[in-house]
Amino acid sequence: MSQRWYMRIAMCIALIFIISFLTVIRFEQRKIKSFLNPVKELAEKMHFPDESKFSQLVNQLKEHKKAPVLQLVNNITKWSSDRLPKMNRTYQSIKNVLKNQIGEALVGKNKMSGQSLISNQLYGSFNSELVNYDVHIFYYPWYLSEGYDGRWKHWNHNRLPYWKKGEIDKYSTSSHTPVDDIAADFYPELGPYSSNDPSVIKQHMKWIKQSGAGVAVVTWYPPTMSDDFGDPIDPIFPKLLDAANEEDLKIAFHIEPYKGRKVVTLRENLKYIVDKYGDHPALFKTERHGKLVPVYYIYDSYLIPFKEWSRLLSKNGELSIRGTELDGFFLGLLIELKHRFEIKKAGFDGYYTYFAAEGFTYGSSWKSWRDLSSFARQNSLAFVPSVGPGYIDSQVRPWNGVNTRGRKNGKYYKAAWKTAINSLPKWISVTSFNEWHEGSQIEPAVEKAARGRTYMSYSPKNSTFYLDLTREFVSDFYESKTKL
């Protein structure tokens, strides 16, 4: 065969190789493009607060070189999870789009499966910059200080009288006298602070972010109302929402059983909340029937008969807020076994257990959680177990020692978290960030002895031990959900 034929054959082989290479590149580009459109569509549904950031990441992905593509996809997903309340269905959809549609295009001839490589790169450990919107923490803004507000509130809480006849006189009902004597068994690192103080609020939001929890569930009373020992707290909410937004946190309302609470007044409350706070970017919302709605925890919901609740929460109720601008995702407090049926009939979207003392109620008994979660799933309800690091309220209820739960250097907390995660809940709530009266706080505490009192502390651990421990458990919960 002549040299000319050899040259022709070589040129044909080279041409075939070039055409094949360009075809593969073109195919990869089509693959990348095929998932960009649904990702962008999902992004619009999820209301990205910073469209320019998302567009920048997508443009980098379009102009990808092979090596950094997985990291860019990782950045998009982590950025979205850091910014958004994770609406489970939609968020799962975006993960599935990324995992299923780009696997082969990104991996090429790699023998490792596309999905495995994507999973390893995409769903890594819960890192220090993320918060998890599936973890909610109860927050109390009812503390006032003499230095900031000119008077004490809650730190000077009196000891509550015993309710049992014949033993009422056995226990003191005196008030506490800050700063050395406060109505708590632990002493806060910030001292007896004011919940009005912007510097305190800012520090609290940083600490909540450090814990990994993404949503602060803040106790709330209507504008002119308060609990028996405090001042109105609604005026603090604008500060809380703004500070939460700075840390990429969200705020949900924990509606307390204020005097005169009825479904009629609650409808008015919802209108007030939506009108005043509904458009704030830090208001926590979740998906309900294809629409984003605020989330409300209703404390002591059982005080209102479920038939009354159905007037407000059922689709055909005479006061129904369903499908209106006042619609929301409502969680009732489950105390007794029967409450799960009543909560369903009332039209609630789910239930939570609140109490940090294991066994105090049926709902707060860890052994009940798997059954409660199963019932919730079978009835299209959300189950939100509440975990706490311990419980002690001897400075406000000196007669309640039977419900004290020791912390055991975090072992009690770990057991609660493990049980909660294994129950496969929608969300997990933490009781609490700063309920100092009941000793369930994870807010930093310090050692202190004064005026004949020696406060409990987290010793031998440091003051932020429970913040950091919470992040570990939040990470475990995050990992468990990404594997589902």
Image (spheres, rainbow, N blue to C red):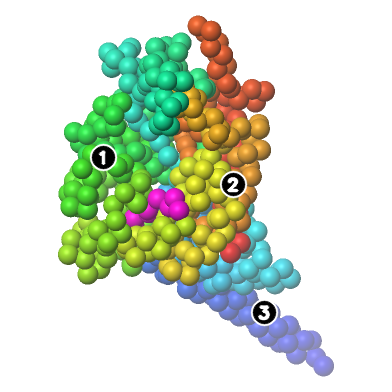
The residue drawn where x is 42% and y is 44% is 215
The residue drawn where x is 34% and y is 60% is 348
- Disc 1 or 3, which lies upstream in sequence? 3
Question: What amino acid type is highlighted by mark number 3?
Answer: Phe
Question: What amino acid type is highlighted by mark number 1?
Answer: Tyr
Residue 52 relative to residue 126: left or right: left
Q: Is residue 352 magenta?
A: no
Secondary structure found at label 3: helix
| Residue to which mark 2 is pinned | 417
The residue drawn where x is 70% and y is 83% is 13
Above or below residue 303? Residue 398 is: above
Image coords of residue 363 (percent x, y)? 49, 51
Which quadrant: the N terminus?
bottom right
Looking at the image, can residue 73 be seen? no
Q: In which image quadrant can residue 10 be found?
A: bottom right
Image coords of residue 49 (percent x, y)? 34, 50
Which quadrant: the C terminus?
bottom right
Residue 181 relative to residue 299: left or right: right
Q: Residues within 10 Å of mark 1 (few under 14, many from 20)?
A: some
The part of the chain drawn in magenta is 327-336
